[in-house]
Amino acid sequence: MTLCYQMDKKQEMIRMAAREFAESEIKPVAGELDEKEEFSVLLTQKMGEIGFFGMVIPEEYGGQGLDYISYIIAVEEVARVDGSQAATLAAGNSLGINPIFEYGSEAQRRKYLPDLCRGRALMGFGLTEPNAGSDAGATKTTAFRDGDSWVINGRKTLTTNANTPMTKGSIVQAVTGLRRDGKPDYTSFVVENGTPGFTLNTLKRKLMWRGSNTAELFLDHCCVPMDAILGNPGDGFKQMLATLDGGRLSIGAMGLGCAQGAYEAALRYSKQRIQFGRPICKQQSIAFKLADMELKIELARNLLYKACWLCENKQPYGKEAAMSKLYCSEIAREVADEAVQIHGGYGLFRDYEVERFYRDQRLLQIGEGTSEILRLVISRAIGC
Amino acid sequence: MKIIVTIKQVPDTHDVKIDPKTGTLIREGVPSIINPEDKNAIEEALRIKGNHEDVEVTALSMGPPQAENALREALVMGVDRAILVSDRAFAGADTLATSYILSIAIKKIKKYDLILCGRQAIDGDTGQVGPQLAEALGLPQATCAEEIGIHGNRATVKSNFDRVIRVIEMKMPALMTVSRQINKPRFKTMNGVLRAFRDKEIIIWTRKDLELNPMRIGINGSPTWVRKIFVPSHSRDGIVIEKQSTETAKDILDYLLEKSLLRF
């Protein structure tokens, strides 16, 4: 295959469609939802009608039947306007929908995917625990078999989309035994909201993504049927790692979109703001900042799209996914930081969107693999 | 029922600047879009399709090869098929030559009940192609439609021209031009994009596919031409009145009456 840097027309149209929606439906309400720390069911449903959920899922399950790059472009375009809504859809697709499609039984796919793909329901992905973040192997949540059901005990936290009025349930990893080598065996379960023993608490007072839902999950003798298992018992860890690889591409897209949005706002402002008798974009100190921003975004986009291309073409992409997420989230920080700097004092106020971009980018170096863990993944991939 | 929607690809004039030296449009880097009111026409056709059985919507455009993008967008919105009439010989067409070529293309399509056009394009702003097309095809027409109702083979149109509202009942086949008040064009969906590229194709007709009079196409067929484009200058010389407030009010009133801007 020859090297080609041109997006195909379909992907260009995806960008145009996603941008039109984001600009006219998300942008006008993003600031207010952030301010009120409010998850919007209405807006999530609208995103569903546009087809932002289930983007790479086949149409027979209610998905959009598109390619991975198209999905990443949609996340990027939403993140260019608002990190919160991008979080809802990136988590919805990569962590809620994808594992059910990849590992679920046909019955589970038929049961959950149509509503999830149409944006009528959401599914959380409970991995992080109070004492098991980067060290996912320290998971304390357990499940044991009791006749025809499994009984889950434990606690999960920082789970996106887990406690909204439209959430159907969460995928939860639990230790279900010990392997021969003494390491724990993990199994994934779909735990539906409303199951006795399953309670949720929305976490408030966040710095960022304030228009998205983040919750903690309490499982207290929570009894689920046998068919709540996702895939095979013992596959949980493998599923989690693969899910996170894909998830990293969408977090990368969030970083890229955030950087793009902050950069465009800074460029626009720099053309209007007059100091020393000239627009500040005509002054080298500011012009060079903008040139660096453009450069970083270009590099980030190339890396991310390459990782998506590898994923789409079923080639190993774990290292590239880690690199994309690491680089996109780090340049999101640098670009948002300089965007605030270019806005000067005004950039410190909520009246200017760069203030929100500056806060929203901060999660990206932490969620779905911290920058440190990603460096670990990359260093292992190169044989360190 | 068969509906034809005529659309034009135009530069997004929100972004267009005029070169102050040459007086020409700077089109570099300016995105091309479906003319906004043509998008309303597409939406209206799709709305009718949603409310009636067996409706087929065809989007038709005359333009250079890249106008295919506008037609593709129409397909994404939900139009069933798209036809691009494109030939180098059509270049330089004014509204008369354009409406002539479109009328010949529509005659080739043969079956239609309704033709919907946007009221006017944001680049040329003439609003002539729709009415000319109706004349060329010998169809009844209603312009500046804000509401369209279809009952059997009759249509009721609420037309708002220069703030005079008329409700027109007409027999189909007929042509209507729609204004932006008629509806809010739908968003393009992700799956709509997939379907438009996977399941639908754009038919291209050149002059060889159409029975055209060579004297009526391109520059030959265009009795009007653009002599000059310029930015009109608006001079605003204010009048300053420095008197007591009641006297000031009286002076303003006198001025307005003198200029016939007020009547009692």
Image (cartoon, helix red, strand yellow):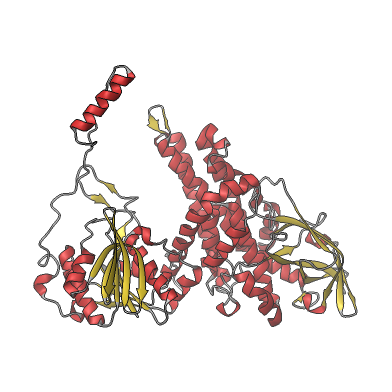
The x and y percentages for residue A184 are: 85, 68
Image quadrant where one finds the C terminus of chain B:
top left
Q: Is residue B112 left or right of residue B78?
A: left
State whether residue B19 is above or below residue A50: above
Regarding residue B34, the answer to whether it shows in the image is no
Q: Is residue B255 left or right of residue A104?
A: left
Regarding residue A341, the answer to whether it shows in the image is yes
The x and y percentages for residue B204 are: 28, 77
Residue A103: quarter of image: bottom right
The x and y percentages for residue B74 are: 38, 69
The x and y percentages for residue A380 are: 70, 61
The single residue placed furthest to the front in the displayed view is: B264
Q: Is residue A234 left or right of residue B135?
A: right
Residue found 51% across the figure and 57% down from its top: A77
Image quadrant where one finds the N terminus of chain B:
bottom left
Residue A219: quarter of image: bottom right
Residue found 59% across the figure and 57% down from its top: A86
Q: Is residue A254 left or right of residue B96?
A: right
Q: Nearer the viewer, residue A136 or B174?
A: B174
Residue found 64% across the figure and 70% down from its top: A116
Q: Nearer the viewer, residue B26 or B203?
A: B203
State whether residue A365 is above or below residue A56: above
